[in-house]
Image (tube, coloured by chain):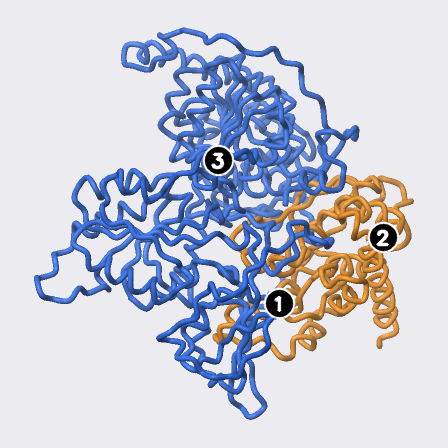
Chain colours: A orange, B blue
């Protein structure tokens, strides 16, 4: 997978890139996946994306599969093959961590949202969730997306922050992201969302640097 | 939210846009294909994974589209439109075709005037269904052609072709998708819709259109000849193609499995079937002759495999290597065929990494905070009555912490099954208290009641049954994402409509005891249910409260006074995501209400013995913490100030509230 610059390379040399997005129903996972697919299409890639709209979305665990390349056959990412796992919640990061290929990148929002068995006192949220994630994924970017979204102007832009935090690992030009975000979000929220994306991107870059230096 | 809606929001609606490509789900592509094919009438009953087709069709003003009360009605509307000369589309989930099977089979004998396509969206893996029946069998059963797209582009192009096929061969066409085609998105090239002349005349052709014995006897041989003609067509159809690669391995496949198989064995040879019934015998024999080993890769039943083997063609691997159960993916196919000696596998797909989630708490679906079904399920659990359930959001009442629904078979079955149970049980001796654990009652939602509960209730009344039916009227078809129905006062297109008067309907069926209750008032719910369960005749209780998700109802949150909470966890029986058990430094436990999640229904407060759960409207000064006797004098939800949230979401997430609105669920 190429992670540098925009898509300038020869069409024939672009292998399929696999992303799995995970989160909790209502966090905007589906919309984030939609933005990704629009950006990839605008950059000339073939795109396939898949999610299940089912009972799982009544506050349940949600995933979206997103793949792009010169020719994509299957809409599904399979466990052990994701180049990037983009998780909107810590428990949902660990739940799907084994979908990453060896050396794959995990970008996750550090927020903890109790699932219903925890809220009902029937189970415990793992207190050491961050340590457990660190133990199973070597290449990790941790993002406090809620705080960054709030800094941008709305706590609801968490999904755009997360896209920003992932953007440096994707071969898409910054201008393409901006064009698509402008097109997809409500007009009044364009500035807030572009700021959210920028804050996420800055966080992602610094996390990436921390990762390479072993910090 | 469908991507069509998203695109529209972004000002790039595929309807008006001059852009020629768009990323669409197969459901949206089918809608687009219907528009491009000149379809005039489209009907459906919502059901995952088919629901978004009609929602997307409704964006095209040239097509009359409707939610019908059930799939049988939808099928008949489409048959009528076809008979009147229109190209017609009818869509349903796989189990919906069971409901619509009667007209579906007759339509095969009748044939078409305008093209007729029946979309069946199957659900391998049962993401949101009660079974994973393989509806390809219906094509063979009803003797009509079967078309299966592999992605969104094929969904659109094949649908247009299906209409040509339907009219050329005078047959309805079964068009089958699965969850992974319906809900996967890929790039689709858009085309235009032809100009259509208005239809002003009905065709009269009674020997063809009136299915009575004398006419049907004449039609049957026509249907049989049609299958032979279709099989001939299949030999040279663009729908079926050989893609030669490595001749050592030949894979016959279709639908979503084609993409998976190409991913797993990119160098193999493929016979890719877009038309999977009737099959092209010569093409299959030709392919067999070109490859060393022949595999059939298909989800669920050995539908293709059995038909191919019946032709006398040797299949080296099919259901003997790939499970008949569940959904496939590229990894399953890679491992199954590689283990059978097939070379050229995509190596990455072979490993099965161990999950790190075995000990993690699950995240199952739950009722939304503020949901009117919550209090009902709490009371039903308390009563320990046997609940014959149905299909909708309230089905979550079968799960912990409620475990208050004890059977569920199919849409509309709850009432008639409760009646059957009641007629089976020995009557309670006079003077002996009723044992509620062995007393059946029915529970059903408004949309499911309109779908197929009405005739069941008629049965109870007509045959002198004594069953209690609890109708949960939340004014929407909630589980599939909030579609209109005959009780909502609006059509699919958002136009004003008549509204079914449920109490009057029940009375007209012969039910004399009809009571309406507020499902957020637990004391009232319990009192009325106890009275009606003791009644010596059939009765109906209607719990009326609108869906908070669909109607964007946002009430002010309640809170828990920490000093009053004794950590008894009674409130956690509400199974509400707004309630959160906290560990207190002194080692005890207390419950808090998360204000961002709470939707102010007050149900938890009604079970708190300590009066710790209190409502403090933001406009009101906090009151002193006097403990009201909550269990005996529950706070009425009317005390809670109700405000309706703005309809336009002000965020990129769009639907980023505490609960999803992009979710679609079971029918």
- Of circles 2 and 1, the one toward us is 1
Judging by the rendered image, the residue that carries numbered circle 3 is B92
* Position of residue B238 measured from the top left corner of the image (x, y, whole percent): 63, 21
Q: Is residue B445 above or below residue B528?
A: above
Look at the image and tell me whether residue B415 can be seen: yes
Say left or right for A210 vs B435.
Answer: right
Given this view, does label 2 or label 3 mark the residue nearer the observer? 3
Examine the rendered structure and indicate whether residue B308 appears above or below residue B414: above
User: Which residue occupies 37% across, 75% down?
Assistant: B631
Q: Earlier in the sequence, mark 3 or mark 1?
A: 3
Please, is residue B641 above or below residue B424 in the view? below
Secondary structure of residue under mark 1: loop
Residue at mark 2 shares a chain with residue at mark 3: no
Q: Quadrant of the C terminus of chain A?
A: bottom right
Q: Which residue is mark 2?
A: A2
Q: Nearer the viewer, residue B578 or B416?
A: B578
Q: Is residue A101 left or right of residue A213?
A: left
In terms of secondary structure, where does tag 2 sit?
Answer: loop
B31 lies left or right of B466: right
Closer to the eye: label 3 or 1: 1
Label pair 2/3, CB-CB below 8 angstroms: no
Residue B387 at x, y = what percent? Answer: 30, 57
């Amino acid at each position: 997978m190429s992670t540098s610059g925009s898509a300038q390379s020869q069409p024939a040399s672009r292998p399929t890139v696999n992303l799995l997005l995970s989160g909790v129903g209502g966090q905007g996972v589906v919309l984030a996946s939609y933005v990704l697919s629009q950006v990839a299409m605008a950059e000339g890639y073939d795109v396939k994306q898949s999610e299940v709209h089912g009972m799982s979305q009544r506050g349940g665990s949600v995933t979206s599969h997103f793949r792009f390349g010169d020719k994509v056959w299957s809409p599904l990412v399979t466990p052990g093959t994701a180049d990037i796992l983009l998780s909107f919640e810590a428990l949902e990061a660990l739940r799907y961590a084994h979908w990453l290929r060896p050396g794959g990148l995990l970008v996750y929002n550090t927020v903890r949202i109790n699932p219903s068995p925890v809220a009902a006192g029937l189970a415990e949220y793992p207190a050491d969730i961050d340590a457990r994630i660190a133990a199973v994924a070597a290449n990790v970017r941790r993002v406090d997306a809620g705080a960054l979204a709030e800094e941008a102007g709305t706590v609801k832009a968490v999904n755009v922050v997360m896209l920003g935090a992932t953007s440096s690992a994707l071969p898409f030009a910054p201008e393409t992201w901006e064009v698509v975000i402008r097109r997809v979000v409500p007009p009044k929220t364009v500035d807030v969302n572009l700021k959210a994306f920028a804050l996420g991107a800055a966080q992602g870059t610094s996390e990436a640097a921390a990762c390479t230096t072993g910090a | 939210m469908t991507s069509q809606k998203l695109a529209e929001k972004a000002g790039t609606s595929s309807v008006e846009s001059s852009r020629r490509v768009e990323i669409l789900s197969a459901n949206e592509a089918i809608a687009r294909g219907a528009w491009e094919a000149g379809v005039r009438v489209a009907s459906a009953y919502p059901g995952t994974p088919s629901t978004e087709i009609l929602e997307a069709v409704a964006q095209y003003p040239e097509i009359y589209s409707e939610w019908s009360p059930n799939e049988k009605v939808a099928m008949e509307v489409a048959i009528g439109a076809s008979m009147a000369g229109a190209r017609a589309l009818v869509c349903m989930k796989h189990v919906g075709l069971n409901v619509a099977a009667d007209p579906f089979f007759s339509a095969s004998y009748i044939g078409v005037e305008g093209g007729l396509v029946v979309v069946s969206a199957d659900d391998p893996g049962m993401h949101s269904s009660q079974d994973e029946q393989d509806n390809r069998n219906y094509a063979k059963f009803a003797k009509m052609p079967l078309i299966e797209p592999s992605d969104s582009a094929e969904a659109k192009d094949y649908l247009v072709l299906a209409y040509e096929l339907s009219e050329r061969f005078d047959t309805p066409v079964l068009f089958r998708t699965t969850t992974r085609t319906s809900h996967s998105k890929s790039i689709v090239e858009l085309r235009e819709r032809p100009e259509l002349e208005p239809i002003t005349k009905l065709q009269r052709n009674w020997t063809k259109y009136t299915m009575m014995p004398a006419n049907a006897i004449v039609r049957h041989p026509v249907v049989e000849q049609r299958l032979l003609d279709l099989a001939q067509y299949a030999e040279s159809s663009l729908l079926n193609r050989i893609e030669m690669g490595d001749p050592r391995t030949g894979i016959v496949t279709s639908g979503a499995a084609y993409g998976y198989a190409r991913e797993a064995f990119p160098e193999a040879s493929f016979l890719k079937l877009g038309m999977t019934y009737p099959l092209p015998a010569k093409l299959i024999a030709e392919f067999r002759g070109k490859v060393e080993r022949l595999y059939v890769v298909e989800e669920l039943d050995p539908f293709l495999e059995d038909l191919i083997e019946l032709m006398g063609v040797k299949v080296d691997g099919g259901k003997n290597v790939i499970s008949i159960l569940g959904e496939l993916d590229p990894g399953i196919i890679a491992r199954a065929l590689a283990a059978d000696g097939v070379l050229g596998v995509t190596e990455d797909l072979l490993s099965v990494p161990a999950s790190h989630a075995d000990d993690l708490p699950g995240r199952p679906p739950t009722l939304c905070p503020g949901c009117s079904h919550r209090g009902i399920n709490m009371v039903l659990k308390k009563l320990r009555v046997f609940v014959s359930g149905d299909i909708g959001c309230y089905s979550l009442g079968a799960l912990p912490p409620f475990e208050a629904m004890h059977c569920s078979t199919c849409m509309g079955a709850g009432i008639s099954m409760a009646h059957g149970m009641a007629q089976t049980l020995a009557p309670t001796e006079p003077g002996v208290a009723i044992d509620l654990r062995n007393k059946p009652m029915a529970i059903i939602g408004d949309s499911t009641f309109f779908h197929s509960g009405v005739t069941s209730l008629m049965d109870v009344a007509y045959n002198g049954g004594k069953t209690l039916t609890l109708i949960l009227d939340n004014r929407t078809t909630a589980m599939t994402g909030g579609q209109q129905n005959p009780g909502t006062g609006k059509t699919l297109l958002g136009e004003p409509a008549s509204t079914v008067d449920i109490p009057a309907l029940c009375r007209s069926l012969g039910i004399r005891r009809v009571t309406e209750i507020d499902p957020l008032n637990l004391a009232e719910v319990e009192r009325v249910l106890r009275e009606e369960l003791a009644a010596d005749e059939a009765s109906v209780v209607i719990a009326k409260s609108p869906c908070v998700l669909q109607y964007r109802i946002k009430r002010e949150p309640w809170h828990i006074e920490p000093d009053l909470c004794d950590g008894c966890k009674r409130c956690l029986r509400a199974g509400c995501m707004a309630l959160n058990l906290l560990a207190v430094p002194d080692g005890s436990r207390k419950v808090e209400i998360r204000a961002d999640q709470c939707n102010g229904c007050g149900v938890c407060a009604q079970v708190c013995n300590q009066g710790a759960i209190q409502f403090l409207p933001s406009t009101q000064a906090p009151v002193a913490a006097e403990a009201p006797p909550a269990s005996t004098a529950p706070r009425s939800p009317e005390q809670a100030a109700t405000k309706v949230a703005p309809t336009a979401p002000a965020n990129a997430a769009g639907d980023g509230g505490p609960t999803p609105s992009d979710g679609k669920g079971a029918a």
